[in-house]
């Protein structure tokens, strides 16, 4: 009996989502740590939403990203990895939404590194937000699929056992 190709494809998609997110989180963590070690004036400013200096905030965010990336790479639980990525992406989205609502249009997510990239101003931040939306949606899809799959499996097992049991009236 061979595995259902849809299940195999979904598992591959989930693995790709988790591994690519882990690699990107490691890259952004390195960018944050590099920027936090610099002397940019923004590092001395306090984040208006979280009321922390940007330097310690970037270091904390980088450490969190490293921990999540390692979990995404090492954990064997598809559900656990999806839940962790959902949690992280939801927090990133909430932070950006709150900043938007407060009228804050600067995000030091990648630190001063974005100033050195040959890209239009704001494009790296827009790409990161789009990527976080993709992580969020991918995690929700994965969790939905895993939960639905588990319920379907329980239902089919219950139906099979009910059909196999001889009825009391037959005896």
Image: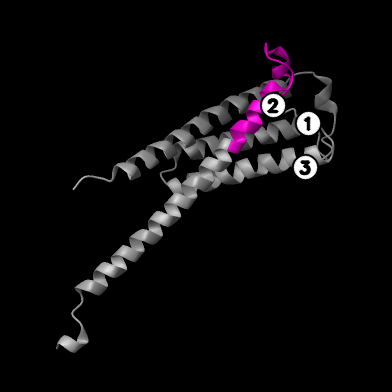
Q: Residues within 10 Å of mark 3 (few under 14, many from 20)?
A: few
Work out whether residue 135 or residue 79 is closer to the camera in this orientation and state it.
135
Q: Can see residue 94?
A: yes
Q: Position of residue 135 (x, y in %)?
A: 56, 38
Query: Which labelled disc corresponds to residue 54?
Result: 1
> Disc 1 versus disc 2: distance between alpha carbons?
16 Å
Check disc 3 and report the residue beneath it. 98
Secondary structure, mark 3, is helix
Of the residues under marks 1 and 2, which one precedes in the sequence? 1
In the picture shown, does residue 137 fall above or below 146?
above
Asked whether, in this view, residue 47 is left or right of residue 171, the answer is: right
Q: In this orientation, does residue 33 appear?
A: no
- Expressed as whole percent of the image width and height from the top left, the position of residue 57 reads 74, 34
Up the image or down, 137 lies above or below 24; here it is: below
Whether 164 is among the magenta residues is no
Residue of label 2: 125
Q: Measured from the top left, where is residue 14 in percent x and y?
A: 44, 39
Q: Residue furthest left?
A: 171
> Magenta stretch: dominant SS?
helix
Magenta span covers which residues? 110-133
Q: State if disc 2 and disc 1 touch (CB < 8 Å).
A: no
Q: Quadrant of the C terminus?
A: bottom left
| Foreground label between 1 and 2 | 2
Sequence-wise, the earlier of marks 3 and 2 is 3
Mark nearest the camera among 3 and 1 is 3
Q: Residue at x 81, y 33 (%)?
A: 53
Residues tagged 3 and 2 counted as in contact (Cβ below 8 A):
no
């Amino acid at each position: 009996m061979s595995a259902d190709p849809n299940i195999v494809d979904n598992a591959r998609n989930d693995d790709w989502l988790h591994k690519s997110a882990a690699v990107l989180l490691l890259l952004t963590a390195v960018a944050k740590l590099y920027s936090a070690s610099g002397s940019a004036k923004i590092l001395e400013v306090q984040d208006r939403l979280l009321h922390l200096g940007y330097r310690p905030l970037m270091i904390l965010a980088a450490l969190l990203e490293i921990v999540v990336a390692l979990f995404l790479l090492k954990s064997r639980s598809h559900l656990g990895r999806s839940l962790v990525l959902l949690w992280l992406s939801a927090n990133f989205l909430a932070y950006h939404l709150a900043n938007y609502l407060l009228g804050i249009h600067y995000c030091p997510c990648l630190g001063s590194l974005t100033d050195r990239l040959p890209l239009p101003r704001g494009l790296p931040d827009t790409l990161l937000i789009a990527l976080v939306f993709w992580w969020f949606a991918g995690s929700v899809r994965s969790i939905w699929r895993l939960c639905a799959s588990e319920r379907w499996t329980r239902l089919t097992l219950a139906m099979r056992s009910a059909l196999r049991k001889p009825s009391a009236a037959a005896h």
